[in-house]
């Protein structure tokens, strides 16, 4: 299985209405290890293209909205995306979550804890038909002015065929700051479900483009 997530736009508005520096979750699998500023609203959108067993799936808008509740806490809302396949299409489930900053040091180490819950609001063919919790622990360590190492440990409890299938996921990436808004990174991700065996290990080479604007 291969997957590509193309970011379309990421915007952040501060309480004063002035543009602020942004750290986005997309296009990497690894989420950001920091929260957005207090009172700020950040919206990310993208298109995901997945190729599994010769079948291509398009997902969009892959929207995530986050709001800075405090200097260390953000609220998260995952907008249902529309999945299009030759077999079935429709909107997926929505999810609500909270992200808490749990680590921030002068040495450049950051870590956060994300708790989320999805709700079965999607189309019959796309919804899991269950209330599915997840837990994620993204972290990052600044190595130099241009290099950063990061990763994420995750636990998911998706509903599959009416049953929970506890799935662990681990990611690791190296990010290289290029010039201006350009970043390049290589990322490893592996999923390890309780039932069905581990998925093939995937290695992605991506080029990330960051956009900053006032919402």
Image (spheres, rainbow, N blue to C red):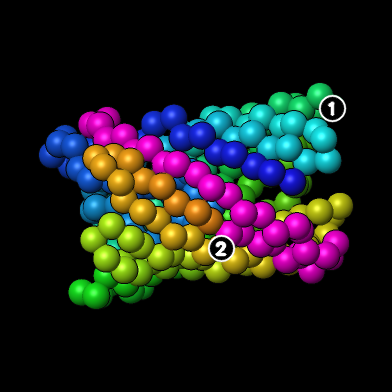
User: Please, what secondary structure does the residue beneath circle 1 have?
Assistant: loop
Q: For label 2, count other residues whose C-alpha is less than 10 Å away and answer few (under 14), some (14-19) or many (20+).
A: some
Q: Which residue is mark 1?
A: 87
Label at residue 179: none
Q: In screen coordinates, is 128 left or right of 162?
A: left
The residue stretch that appears in magenta: 188-215
Tell me residue 55's x, y (percent).
80, 33
Q: Identify the residue shown where x is 82% and y is 35%.
A: 54
The quarter of the picture where residue 209 lies is: top left
Q: Identify the residue shown where x is 40% and y is 56%.
A: 175
Find out whether residue 208 is within the magenta segment: yes
Measured along the vertical axis of the image, is residue 178 above or below residue 6? below
Measured along the vertical axis of the image, is residue 50 above or below residue 177? above
Toward the viewer: 174 or 69?
174
Q: For label 1, count other residues whose C-alpha is less than 10 Å away and answer few (under 14), some (14-19) or many (20+).
A: few
- CA separation, marks 2 and 1? 30 Å
Find out whether residue 194 is within the magenta segment: yes
Q: Identify the residue shown where x is 44% and y is 60%.
A: 174
Q: Identify the residue shown where x is 68% and y is 38%.
A: 50
Tell me residue 157's x, y (percent).
69, 62
Q: In screen coordinates, is 136 left or right of 34?
A: right
The quarter of the picture where residue 57 lies is: top right
Q: Is residue 81 visible?
A: no
Image quarter where the C terminus lies is top left
Q: Which residue is mark 2?
A: 171
User: Please, what secondary structure does the residue beneath circle 2 have?
Assistant: strand
Tell me residue 136's x, y (percent).
53, 64
The quarter of the picture where residue 213 lies is: top left
């Amino acid at each position: 299985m291969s997957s590509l997530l193309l970011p379309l736009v990421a915007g952040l508005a501060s309480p004063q209405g002035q543009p602020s520096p942004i750290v986005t979750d997309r296009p990497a699998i690894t989420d950001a290890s920091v929260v957005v500023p207090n009172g700020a609203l950040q919206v990310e959108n993208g298109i995901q293209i997945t190729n599994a067993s010769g079948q291509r799936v398009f997902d969009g808008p892959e929207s995530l909205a986050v709001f800075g509740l405090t200097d260390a806490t953000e609220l998260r809302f995952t907008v249902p995306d529309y999945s299009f396949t030759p077999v079935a299409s429709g909107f997926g489930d929505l999810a609500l979550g909270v992200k808490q900053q749990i680590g921030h040091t002068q040495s450049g180490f950051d870590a956060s804890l994300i708790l989320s819950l999805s709700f079965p609001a999607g189309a019959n063919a796309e919804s899991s038909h269950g209330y599915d919790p997840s837990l994620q622990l993204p972290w990052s360590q600044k190595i130099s002015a241009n290099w950063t190492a990061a990763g994420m440990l995750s636990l998911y409890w998706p509903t599959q065929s009416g049953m929970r299938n506890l799935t662990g996921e681990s990611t690791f990436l190296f990010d290289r700051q290029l010039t201006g808004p350009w970043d390049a990174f290589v990322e490893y991700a592996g999923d390890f479900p309780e039932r069905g065996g581990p998925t093939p290990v995937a290695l992605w080479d991506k080029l990330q483009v960051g956009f900053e604007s006032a919402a």
